[in-house]
Amino acid sequence: MSHMTCTTTWTEKLSFDTQVRSHQFFMDSKINSFDKGPTPKELVLAGIAGCSAMDVISLLHKYKQPVKQFHIDSETDTSDGHPSVFTKVTVKYRVEGEVDPDKYKEAVHLSMTKYCGVSAMISKACPIFYEVYLNGQLIHHDRAQF
């Protein structure tokens, strides 16, 4: 078992400084504030992408795949009213390079069914769908299942 801590301090309006270990970042609201940083929900969406990206790139390196470029585009729909929550997340994996399609699909599948803790948590509240692109071509799509 692991333990995490963070400290979030109000600065003004709806702006906050947050400290996690030795890392500091800023959160803000898009409404009634300065919009100088991501919102908490945007950070959750980024957390899904970041957690899964670490899984996928680690596995592709383990599989000795020659990745030239890699990025994830993620998006979510949110509900109306309060609280506004994620209703559906879509994660699009994009790799460029001479990568074996089966190894790549396996890496994403493992992330979305076994390894990505952030996706595992969020998928309990709303569905996460994913698409796998290799050199600009869609080669696979599925739903996260933990």
Image (tube, grey):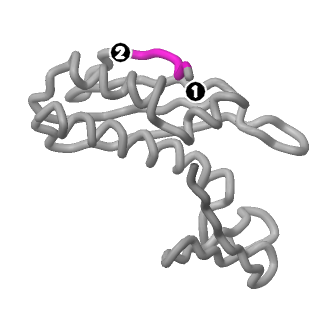
Asked whether 126 or 121 is in front, the reply is 121
Q: Is residue 75 left or right of residue 53?
A: right
Question: Please, what is the dominant secondary structure of the magenta stretch?
Answer: strand
**Residue that numbered label 1 is attached to:** 128
Q: Tell me if residue 26 is in the magenta stretch.
A: no
Relative height, residue 117 to residue 143 (above, below) = below
Of all residues, the one furthest to the bottom in this rendering is 11
Q: Quadrant of the C terminus?
A: top right
Percent across and percent down for residue 78 are 73, 37
| Side of 61 where 25 appears, left or right | right
Where residue 61 sits, quadrant-wise, is top left
Secondary element at tag 1: strand
Q: Which residues are the magenta region?
A: 141-145
Q: Amino acid at mark 2?
A: His
- Closer to the N terminus: mark 2 or mark 1? 1
- For badge 1, the amino acid type reads Ile
Return the residue at label 2. 140
